[in-house]
Image (cartoon, rainbow, N blue to C red):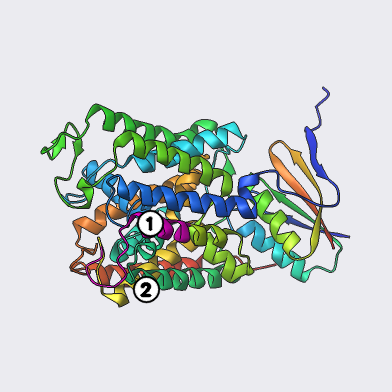
Amino acid sequence: MSTTVDARGLSCPQPVLDTMMAIQSTTDDTITVMVDTEASKENVSRAASGKGWKVQSIDEINGEYTLTLIRG
Amino acid sequence: MHTMPPFTTTIFQGETWTMKNYLASKWGIIGVGAIIGVLAALLQKLGNPGNMGICVACFERDIAGAIGLHRAAVVQYMRPEIIGFVLGSLGAALATKDFRPRTGSAPIVRFVLGIFAMIGALVFLGCPWRAMLRLAGGDLNAIFGLLGLIGGVWIGTMFLKGGYNLGAAKKTYPAVGLIMPLIMFGFLILALLYPMIPGQAQNGVLLYSLKGPGAMHAPLFIALAIGLGVGILAQRSRFCTMGAFRDLILFKQTHLFGGVVALVIAAWVVNMIFGPFHPGFADQPVAHTQSLWNFMGMVLAGLAFALAGGCPGRQLFLAGEGDGDAAIFVFGMIVGAGFSHNFGLASSPKGVGPHGIAAVVIGMIVCLAIGWFMRKKRA
């Protein structure tokens, strides 16, 4: 199972906040986060790494990013 | 007809994610903060007002004065630093495919937040950047401003935790994202067409201060070049003074905070070596000593920045990379400067303006209401 966070279009710090909430509440081992700015991509990656999660992959589709985070 | 699937690129796959954008790394942001601190102190040496090498609020206020939105004769000048910030950010964003035209996240709310952000900042007499530079120059009144900033940001994080959210912005035409940079370019053209003439309070459509902080400025092209440089560095590094405190409070993350600390230390070192450094409360440049209102002005400003998602500088850099909502916040600040000086809300070295306290109270009520009523229920 995987949890999905759609933070596209949201401004700072919403993407990180939503990701952190998902990290705290989920029992899944994978979280998929969708963002649409470079800064959000960096911020979510940094925050997830700080919480011991790993960024497994980042896919770009038409300028939007899908980050796959896995429990560390 | 066959439709093409969307073009997908896997830009990262592996065990350890490392930041490709070096300026957004830990040492990157510290380096950017230090460079900004040095350049700001340098601008003071080159003619900008005391402890005001770079002050986004003050300089937008001076621009409002230059185009006659207020008639406070001592604070009128088309500041090239602000123009450089937006155009530098635009250049960096275009060069790195980071230009993302977007808008539509509650623009009217962002406009009002910009107005009260400016009103609060002008009660203290400075944006967060200037609060740091004042501290680095020995102005201990800045401590109350910084404590206020932290207090305002803290209130903002409470709303963020409670579900405060202005909604998603939508992608839009590149031309929309270019409006703010084009307006800044227009301001630059005006500054070149109607340059300052010594002893003259007006040239063409632009107003100029003959005395006061508005009459103190570094040479135009040096200020513009430094503005462009800072715009490029800050766009790449996402430097944000409000975010520094917000992330510390909200996520216990020290990333952006490193940049802010570096700025203060760098500016302080330059001040210690080349002067001036005058520790104390009294007789500080462009500052007053009413501690409560230094504090409360920045509580209001800090709350407005937190609700809008960035300090005044960051809003300029976002506007440069195509964020139309940040551009609206910037215009809110410029209009707020007009209100501040037309209605006697702004402080002066003598103390708070005749209606400054009333404006802070009204601003707090408005910003608290925005935080309270614009919440989404968490799923």
Magenta span includes B279 = yes
Residue B166: horizontal and vertical position, in percent?
54, 58
Q: Left or right: where does residue B67 sit relative to residue B375?
A: left
Residue B258: horizontal and vertical position, in percent?
56, 60
Q: Chain of mark 2?
A: B
Secondary structure beneath dot 1 equals helix
Is B86 in front, or is B29? B29
Where B108 sits versus B85, above or below? Answer: below
Q: Left or right: where does residue B267 sit relative to residue A5?
A: left
Q: Which residue is the extreme one toward the bottom? A: B292
Residue that appears at 38% across and 56% down: B273
Q: Earlier in the sequence, mark 1 or mark 2?
A: 2
> Which disc is residue B273 wearing?
1
Quarter containing the C terminus of chain B: bottom right
Q: Which residue is the extreme one toward the left? A: B199
Residue B270: horizontal and vertical position, in percent?
40, 55
Q: Residues within 10 Å of mark 2 (few under 14, many from 20)?
A: many
Residue hosting label 2: B144
> Which disc is residue B37 wearing?
none
Q: Which residues fall within the magenta stretch?
A: B263-284
Where B99 sits versus B153, above or below? Answer: above
Quarter containing the N terminus of chain B: top right
Q: Residues within 10 Å of mark 1 (few under 14, many from 20)?
A: few
Secondary structure beneath dot 2 equals helix
Is B141 in front, or is B187? B141
Q: Is residue B365 visible?
A: no
Circle nearer the viewer, 1 or 2: 1
Q: Three-letter amino acid code at disc 1?
A: Ile
The image quadrant of residue B226 is top left
Whole-number angstrom distance, CA of label 1 to CA of label 2: 26 Å
Q: Is residue B33 visible?
A: yes
